[in-house]
Amino acid sequence: MAETRRSGVVLSGAARRARQMMVGGLVLAHAIGLGILGLALALGGAPAAITVALGFAAVVIFFSIGQAIEIIACELDPVLGMGVALASYAVRVVGIGLGMWFLLGHPAVEPVISRGWLLLAVTGTVIAWVTGVVVVAARQRVPIYDEEYVAPIGVKD
């Protein structure tokens, strides 16, 4: 089923499902990430909260860009789409990795960073994002795999 946005962009079923999974990941990652941030602020003060905010932001940026590119890749030729997604992954890993390496090693930031809080923030946010994506994906109706799915009259998915 194609969906028309106010901007006039029409999304395929695959792109629409990818967008829904992105929203699921964003919602659960923010819920858990902000919960960890509050815990860090209450238990470890400002240094712990800064550390958690850095880890949380890195994960959300990494996955948000990746999922957004996946939505675009769904609309491309399969080989080109796969190439774009893989190139995006390489750029994100290197870019965010170098950014975190520089930031965490900076003399003004390094003394404030708590490795335990960073580990908790990154791990918790990654697990939350992936769980949000999986929960949404498990509830989606994909016509090619779902024999019970019946598209509304006049709509092709």
Image: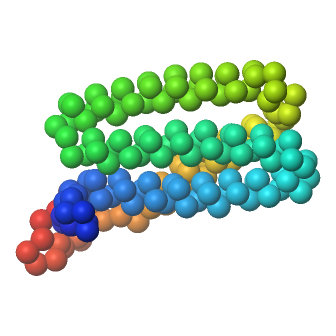
On screen, residue 64 versus residue 74, left or right, reads right
On screen, residue 10 versus residue 109, left or right, reads left
Image position, residue 122 (x, y; %): 68, 41
Q: Is residue 25 above or below residue 154?
A: above
Q: Is residue 9 above or below residue 148?
A: above
Image position, residue 68 (x, y; %): 38, 46
* Image quarter hosting the N terminus: bottom left
To which quarter of the image does residue 83 belong? top left
Q: Residue furthest left?
A: 154
Image position, residue 55 (x, y; %): 68, 40
Who is closer to the viewer here, 65 or 18? 65
Who is closer to the viewer here, 46 or 75? 46
Residue 125 visible in the picture = yes
Q: Is residue 99 above or below residue 14?
A: above
Residue under the image location 49 percent in, 60 percent down: 24
Q: Residue furthest bottom?
A: 153
Residue under the image location 8 percent in, 75 percent down: 154
Residue under the image location 35 percent in, 41 percent down: 69
Residue 132 visible in the picture = no
Residue under the image location 84 percent in, 44 percent down: 48
* Image quarter hosting the C terminus: bottom left
